[in-house]
Amino acid sequence: MLNEDLKINQEGHLLFGGADTVALAKQYGTPLYVMNENRIRKICNMYKQSIEKCYHGNGLPLFASKAFCCKEICRIMNDEGMGLDVVSGGELYTAMQAGFPPERIQFHGNNKTTEEMKYALTCGVGHFVVDNLTELHTLDNLAGCMHGHANILLRIKPGIDAHTHKFIRTGQIDSKFGFALETGEAMAAVKEALQAKNVTLTGLHCHIGSQIFEIQPFLLAAKVMLTFIRDIKAETGAELQELNLGGGFGIKYTEQDQPVPYDQYMEQVSKTVHSCCSEYNLALPKIYIEPGRSIVGESGLTLYTIGAVKSIPNTRTYVSVDGGMTDNPRYILYQSTYEAIVANKAEKPRDYTVTIAGRCCESGDLIQEHTPIQKCAPGDILAVLSTGAYNYSMASNYNRVPRPAVVFVKDGSPRVAVRRESYADLVQNDL
C-alpha cells in the first residue's frame, strides 16, 4: 500500500481513511472523488509546526488551491490557520464564499485580467504576486483609481531546472512566469515597483516546478533569492521583508516514488535561509511556502465502476471504466503514473496486467497502461490512488460527461462536499 491510510477489511475491501470504498461507491455512485480529511489536516499541521520550528513562527504555509479548490477545502484550510494561494478570480471567489480571510490570500497568475484585479482589490487580498510590468502598471493604476492600495511580491525566475516534466518546470529562464535575473529584468522591475505610488513591494516570490524529489534545487533557489535580496538592498537601499519560496514537493504516486519527508525539506531549506541571512547581514524575512499537491495528492483517490474488459491477443487487455480523461486528464497530458486496486478484491494479488481505458471518444483517453491490478470483471470497483491533486480541479465536461461528486471522509464517516453534476447542470447556461 502507498500510505498508512489504505487498509483492507475482513471482506477484502479497500478502506481509505477508515471508510469502505466499495460502500462509498454504492452509496454515492461512480466516478467518485474521495478525500481523507484527517490526512489533509495532519499535513497542514506538520507544515505549520515546521514554520514555527524553523522560522520561529515568522512565516505562513499557503495552500496552493489550484491543486484542489472547493469551498470545503477552503474551510478546512481556514480551520488549520493556513493561507491560500489563488490563481484566478474563480478560486478567489470560492475562497470568499467559504469565508476565508482575504488577508491570508496571495493572488498569483501570469495574466490576471483587469476585472480579476479589481475584484481582488475590493476583497482586500493580502498580496498580489506580480508577474510582469504590464500587471505592475495596471495594478498601480487600478489601486489609485479605486483609492486603494496593494501589497505585492514580484515573481522571480531563479534560473533553476528542477529536473521534472518539461510542462511543470517554472523556474528556468525560458518560462512564461516571472522576471528573469540573468537579463537584469528582475532588478529593473524592483526599481519600478519601489517607485509605484499605490503598491508596496514587500518581497519576492519564486517557484521552480512541481513533483520534485531532490532537496538541492530548493536549497539553491533559497540562496539565489536571498542573494538577490542582498543585491536589491545594496543597489536601492530597500531591504525586502518577505520571501515566498513556492512549493513543488513530490508525492508518492507509485511504490517507485521516494519523496523526502516534507519536514526535512523545511528544515534543510531553513538552514540555507538562516545561513544566507547571517552572511549577507539581512534580517530574516517572513517565509511563505505553497504546498498543494503534497497536502491533497495522496489524500485523495478516485473510484470507478469497471465496464467492458476487452482482451486483444498478444497485444493488451483494456479495462474500461465509467470515467477517464474528463475526471483525470493527467495521463493524457503528462503520462503521469498511478497505481490502481480493484477495491472489492483488494486482498487478492495484483497479477493482472491491463490498460485502464476511459469512456471518452479519444484513443488517448487512458488512465494507465500496462499496470497490474487484481483479476477483474464488469461491475467491480476500481480505485485509482493519489488522485487528490489536479484531478477534480482539471476535470471537464468533454463529451458532455457530468463531473463526479466529491466526498470527504473524516474518522471513517463520509459527507458530500461537492454534488455530482446532472445532465440539467450541463445545459443550464445554454440558450
Image: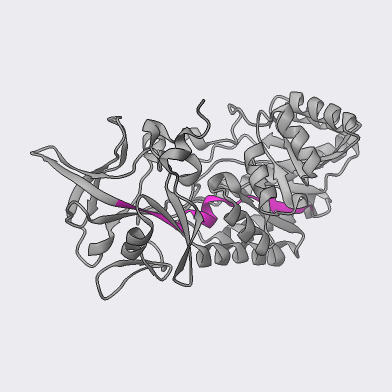
Rendering colour mode = one colour
- Tell me if I can see residue 308 in this picture: yes
- Name the residue nearer the viewer: 221 or 384: 384
Image: magenta residue range:
285-304
Residue 195 higher or lower than 63, as above or below? above
Left or right: 199 as drawn, with respect to 381: right
* Residue 366 vertical placement versus 137 (above, below): below
Question: What residue is at 22 percent from the left and 63 percent from the top?
Answer: 345
- Left or right: where does residue 133 sit relative to residue 333? right
**Which sits in the foreground, 147 or 61?**
147
- 303 inside magenta stretch: yes
Q: How many marks?
A: 0
Choose between 16 and 304: the one closer to the eye: 304
Q: Indicate yes or no whether the magenta region holds residue 159.
A: no
Q: Residue furthest bottom?
A: 10
Residue under the point 70% across and 31% down = 131
Relative side of 9 to 416, left or right: left
Coordinates of residue 98 in the picture (x, y in percent): 66, 53
Q: Position of residue 207 (x, y in %)?
A: 62, 41
Residue 395 can be seen, yes or no: no
Q: Quadrant of the N terminus?
A: bottom left
Taking the view exactly as shown, the residue that stands out farthest to the left is 313
Could you tell me residue 322's position as x and y percent? 30, 45
Q: Is residue 210 above or below residue 143?
A: below
Q: Residue at x 50, y 28 (%)?
A: 430
Q: Quadrant of residue 176?
A: top right
Which residue occupies 23% across, 54% down? 373
Q: Position of residue 77 (x, y in %)?
A: 63, 58
